[in-house]
Image (cartoon, rainbow, N blue to C red):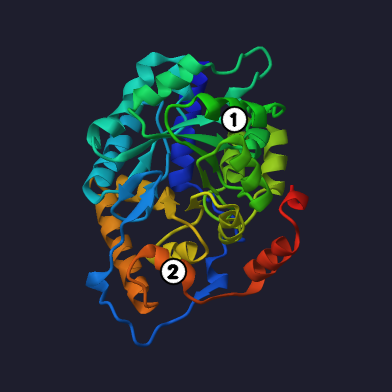
Amino acid sequence: MSGEIRKRKAEHLELAGGGSVEPASGPGWDDVELVHEALPEAAAEEVDLAVELLGHRLELPLVIAGMTGGHPGAAELNAALGRAAQRHGCAVGVGSQRAALADPSLEPTYAALREAAPDAFVIANIGAAQLIPQGARPPLGPDEVARLIAMVDADALAVHLNFLEEAVQPEGDRAVRGCAEAIAALAAGLAVPLIVKETGAGMHEGTARRLLALGADALDVGGAGGTSFALVERLRAERQGDARGVLLGSLLADWGIPTAVAVASCSRAGLPVIATGGVRNGLDAAKALALGATAVGVARPLLLAAQAGADGPSRWIEDFALELRTVLMLTGCRRPGDLAERPRVLAGRVGRWVEALERQPAEAAR
């Protein structure tokens, strides 16, 4: 079992970094227009990028999204991402830690991140599917959850909702009944804040309000438009000759709620929102913040930057901060939270999505 997981995680990293795995429909940032302020009162150098997330100060509104762990190449990548988080004061997550629960020898591939980022806001990670029985495999218990938090000395735990990925994946965990109750039970006994995270299909206000009631402390909308795990799993299915996975992965490649829509909708529920899914630069980040996000999550650009060199992630973050700081100045803002109070225009597909969802009561959208 642990060998299969290890192989799958290595394939995910390979395909996410090099495959054609982004849907054509996009995350929706092109349909979000920020309004220029011709007479700003603060220079770009005076803009303060710091935000608070779950009681922690971040020096810029960036979460290095959890990507990997559990295979031989993961320790080096996690260390590189951890160094960047430590240097720039942003948050950082690890990939699903299920592999290390099955094989403790893999724990160092995750722990490398905390070792490189002793002061960073670190997010542990497990799948919601592991909180309920999957066939003969029992759900994770409190001791196992505590172990994965301790593994990276985590400041928060992300439970990821990757039901689309599991549906396409040849070896996927397909049981779903009882996940909501399991999340509520987890939240009730958790020693750190709980982030509930989608992984590429997004979420809407109705789901956000359900998760608030279940005890979630923050949401990562994981919207459609970035890396599509339906496409990643389709590529894996092709390698394995799995016709079922190829069929579903092709059909559902564009499935989901665009990230821009997910942020606008979920921010109405009142929880802190992390906007992950197709954020590629500081302008995209500014648009997400204008729609109500507290911070943005970035994965693939930082993976590619890390593959280009040890200092790649840090250089990417420096460019990101420059871009975001400049856009804040050009919209008359002194800090990221100001963007939500500035005018913005929603056009095209995103405008239609947002208008339609806002017409529906949150409960009716379930």
Q: Is residue 150 above or below residue 48?
A: above
Identity, as a three-letter code, of the amino acid under mark 2: Leu
Q: Residue 296 versus residue 303: which sits nearer the camera?
A: 296
176 vs 289, left or right, is right
Number of callouts: 2
Three-letter code, disc 1: Ile
Q: Is residue 256 among what the camera can see?
A: no
Whether residue 112 appears in this view of the structure is yes
Pick the residue in front: 178 or 307.
Answer: 178
Q: Residues within 10 Å of mark 1 (few under 14, many from 20)?
A: many
User: What's the mark number on residue 339?
Assistant: 2
In x, y percent, where is residue 292?
51, 61
- How far is the residue under mark 1 from the one under mark 2? 32 Å
Q: Position of residue 138 (x, y in %)?
A: 61, 14
Camera-side residue of 272 and 33: 272
SS label for mark 1: helix
Residue nearer the viewer, 176 or 171: 176
Reply above or below: 162 against 268: above
Q: Residue at x 32, y 70 (%)?
A: 334
Q: Which labelled disc corresponds to residue 183? A: 1
Q: In the rendering, at what x and y percent does residue 13 appear? A: 44, 38
